[in-house]
Every structure is written in structure tokens, then in C-alpha cells.
Amino acid sequence: MSKILILTGDAAETLEVFYPYHRLQEAGFEVHIGAPEARKLQFVVHDFVDGFDTYTEKLGHTWPADVAFADVDPADYVAIVVPGGRAPEYIRNNEDAKRIVRHFFETDAPVAATCHGPLLLAAAGVLHGRTSSAYPELAVDVETAGGVFENGGGVVDGKLVTARAWPDNGTWMKAFLEVLEAAGVRAGGELAAASAG
């Protein structure tokens, strides 16, 4: 079964981790969660309140990470997903997280990122000349990294698929699954055998 890696950590946005995690499993992929350490992570819920200038944050679900970034061989995975929340603010300083991201851009493999996730892509130096969405207040970060910001829910630039935040989850993952299919990336296992027959 083909494997996809989600790069995240504590304070990731619950919906931006779990939606791709379960949607990609549903499509037949084996999905692993990578983090600075292989331990239980605490996710958060970001929401919007009328009259409040930015989002609010509450504790969300917990979930175990399968693998530490340092132990990841990127060649074991066919694609990566970078959710948002506050996790990207600190995992972007992790050299192994940046190493993993660079591998996927160097090999022109599928990458999905949403909300604050493009902060990790910017830190890895892979956004130069690329079009990327992100949480709209991060337009300056995309542009400072040499990218072109597009305010959209399923922005596709080659094999990079980006979105603004969890309200875009359906559009984001639909576009990512289409990119995976166009790139010939299949889940494998029984699902691929059944569809081939």
C-alpha cells in the first residue's frame, strides 16, 4: 500500500490533520503522522468570532505521531501533507522536517499544504517562483519566500496543492486527489487490484 506522510506537531489544527488523514485512508493510502517526536500530540481548534480580529484557539483532540522526523526516509512515501495550526511555526525550524519537504520538491512529488502549513515550505526554500495559497494573513510570508500568493481553496501549481484553512478542506483534498491520480500515484494494495480488474 502506498504511504503518505503528514508533517505536523502539537497545536496543529484538528480539522486540518484529521480530514486529510481520513480522506486519504478512505482513498486506500496508508497514512502516517510525522512529528518532532513519536509521541501523543495535542491538537487545537481554531474558530472565528464576530468582532474579533483573528481566530480563537481551544484544545482539540490528541493523536499519536507514528514517526519522528529524524527517522523518516522520504523515499518511503509517495506524497506529503502539511496541515496548519501553530505547529508549522516551530516545525519549520526542524532541519529534518525541511529535509523531508525538500526531497518532495526535488523529486517533483505531490505536496499538499494548508493554512499555516506553507510556513514550513517557505523555511525549506521551496516556494520561490511557485504559486501558493495559505491563511490570507500569510500572503507576506509566501511572497517574502519568493512565491506568488493566490487566495484560493484548492490552488494547484504543478504537484503542489494549497488552501487557506479548514473551511477549504473538501476543495483542497479533491484537488490533491486529482493531482495524485494525474501523477500516477495510486494507493496500491487491494484497492488498485480491484480497480484494475
Image: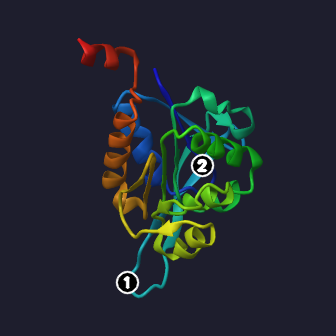
Residue 193 in sight: yes
Front residue of 82 and 197: 197
Q: Which residue is mark 2?
A: 8
| Extreme residue toward the front, this view | 129
Q: Amino acid at mark 1?
A: Asp
Q: Which residue is mark 1?
A: 50
Instruction: Name the residue rendered at 66%, 57% in the picture.
Output: 125
Instruction: Name the residue rendered at 61%, 33% in the picture.
Output: 66
Q: Reply above or below: 9 against 48.
A: above
Front residue of 6 and 133: 133
Q: Amino acid at mark 2?
A: Thr
Q: Quadrant of residue 129?
A: bottom right
Front residue of 60 and 114: 114
| Extreme residue toward the bottom, this view | 51
Q: Reply above or below: 133 against 7.
A: below
Front residue of 196 and 34: 196
- x then y, percent, for residue 137: 51, 76
